[in-house]
Structures are given as structure tokens and as C-alpha cells.
Image: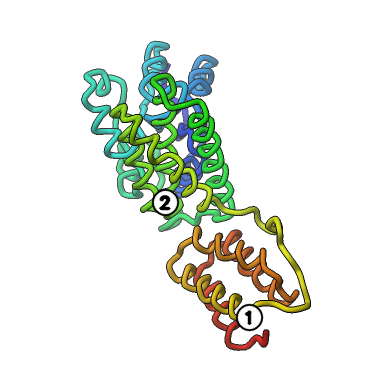
Amino acid sequence: MNCKNCNNRVLVVDDVEINLIIAEELLTLHDLQIETSDNGQTVIDKVMVGEAYDIIFMDLFMPNMDGIETTTKLRALGYNGKIIMLTDDDAFADASKRADVYDLFDGYLPKPIEMPKLENLLHRFLQKHQIPVKSAPSVDKSRLKRAFKCDTENAIKILREVREDGINNSNIELLTSTFHSIKSALANFGESEKSKTAFALEKAGTNGDKEYISTHIDSFIQILEDVVPKPVCQPSSGEISSDGAQDIVFICKALEELKDACNDYSMSLANSTIDDLLKSPLKSTTQSFVEEIRDLLYSDSDFEEASEKIDEFLKEYTF
């Protein structure tokens, strides 16, 4: 099986939705036919019915069937197309110790994806590679936020289930894969410090350090719960609208904290501050303003404009 007439067909395989979106956005700068898949079995099914691609970008660390197993099965089916390993440097360092890796893969693209390295691979493997139509990708922020929410909630669900069952040798691989996936999602969503926490837990899983994971899993679940975006235009439970008394000192302090969170680009702190505000008695005008800031952050991630609006509100509005 080869790809003589693929016409610049590219397949990206990754179990983390936010990673697929970013890869797709970067690849759309080129004249390519782009497909995505979130698991290895789907790729095998495609190849078995005759599908072929100029390049398959294969995530290395996926649950159920990882990238090495998927690629091994593809090669066993006679698939000769280019397959590029897609993973972070640490996972690549571990994988490169295996002798068969260099026979399976045709190259390596580190995550997070950098445009010059992606460009180099495209020029190398695509016969009719086109010059990018734009100098930089324009990522759909609302789509990115929805994907991150989905990835994070899925990770929380898995971690809770494993915690309840008890961490043992039968689920340590699932845990490690989950930490790896959410590490990448957090990094792509701008939560680099939280991504480092996920990396520490991933390494503990790789080393079989169940005690470390048991000690830190609850706090990490809480980190994920704090950072996951809240639904756009959905009231928080306990949200109160009141045209009566409101705690002016609390509101001013909370809005200042919200402005600081915007200036620091901290979605998690902004989330918790907005929740605190909406759970307190507010005049309808104040509540409408807080909801406006919430929607501005959750829909557009426009921290700068949110900070400016809060500053103007504090200067001009009479509580």
C-alpha cells in the first residue's frame, strides 16, 4: 500500500481533541486534504479498506492501542506510507531506546508543534507542497475551549474512577496515559505550570510509583476541576439576582481580583472569582456586568478587554 495519488492527504492521529484542533489549524495553512482520528483502530480500519495518505502524524501515547502498536499493525498490513511520530521530547527519548522504532517511523515531530519543524517535514515528504497561505494560524478560540473542556472532563472522569477502584498494576498504564494526554492539553491551553504537575504524575506512572500518585491524585483532580471552562451563558448553581442590598466591599475586592486574574491570563482564578461573585446577592446591573465578563472570557479568551471593562466599571458604576 502506498500513496502515489494521494494529492496531499494528511491524517493526524491523537486521542486529545485540543491537539487535533491545533494540528489541523496549522495544516490548514497549506493546500492539504486533512483528516483526523482519535484512536489507532480507526486508522487501521481506514487502511484495511484501501485508504492511504502522504503523511500520517501518529501520536505515540494513546489508550487501548498506542502509536507504536498501531504503526506496527499498519506495517504488518503492508502500509508503506510515511508515518511521523507525534509526541513530546520526553516520550520520544523513551521510545527511541526501542530498536524497532526507527524501522516503523519515518520521522519525528515534537509537541507542542512548532511551525518551522512542521514546514520542514511537509517540504520533505510532500511532492506538491504549497507555500502557506497565511503567515500565522488563526485558531478558533471557542472551538479550542470546547475541546479543552471535553479533554479535561474526560481526564477527571478517568482519574476519579481509578481513585475509587484503587491504584494498582492493572490500571497504572491507564493512569499514565491519562496524565500524558492531559499534560499536552494543559500546555496547549496555556496552563504550563499545571502541565508540569501532570508531567510529574506521568513520570511517576512510568516508574510505577503508585505511592506518589496516590498522594497527589486528589489535588490534581481539584486542579483540573478549577481550570475547566464553565459553560458559556449558563448560570452557576446558586446564582442570585437581586435589586436589594449587595456587599459593596466584597464586590469591589472581587472585581479587583478578577481584573488581576485577567492581567495574569489566569482562567482558573477568573473562573473561581466569577463563581464567587455570582453566588452572592447582586443588583441586576452588577450581575449583568459579571455575566458579560464571563462570556467575554469563555467565548473569546479576551483577557485584555475584560480587564479594561472591569477597570471602567469600577471607576464609573455607582453600587
Q: Position of residue 252 (x, y in %)?
A: 57, 79
Query: Vertically, is 269 above or below 250?
Result: above
Q: Tell whether 261 sits left or right of 198.
A: right
Quarter residue 305 falls in: bottom right
Residue visible at 56% across and 65% down? 273
Residue visible at 59% across and 76% down? 250
Q: Tell whether 204 sits left or right of 301.
A: left
Alpha-carbon neighbours of circle 1 within 10 Å: few (<14), some, or many (≥20)? Answer: few
* Inter-mark Cα distance, 1 to 2: 53 Å
Q: Which residue is mark 1?
A: 248
Q: Position of residue 204 (x, y in %)?
A: 31, 34
Residue visible at 61% across and 61% down? 275
Q: Which residue is mark 2?
A: 132
Give yes or no for contact between labels 1 and 2 (Cβ–Cβ under 8 Å).
no
Alpha-carbon neighbours of circle 2 within 10 Å: few (<14), some, or many (≥20)? Answer: some
Name the disc covering residue 171, or none: none
Residue sitting farthest toward the right: 243
Residue visible at 65% across and 77% down? 247
SS assignment at label 2? loop
Q: Check disc 1 and give the amino acid type.
A: Ile
Q: Position of residue 280 (x, y in %)?
A: 67, 68
**Lower position in the chain sequence, tag 1 or tag 2:** 2
Nearer the observer, disc 1 or disc 2?
A: 1
User: Which of 318 and 316 lies nearest the eye of the viewer?
Assistant: 318
Quarter of the image for the C terminus: give it: bottom right
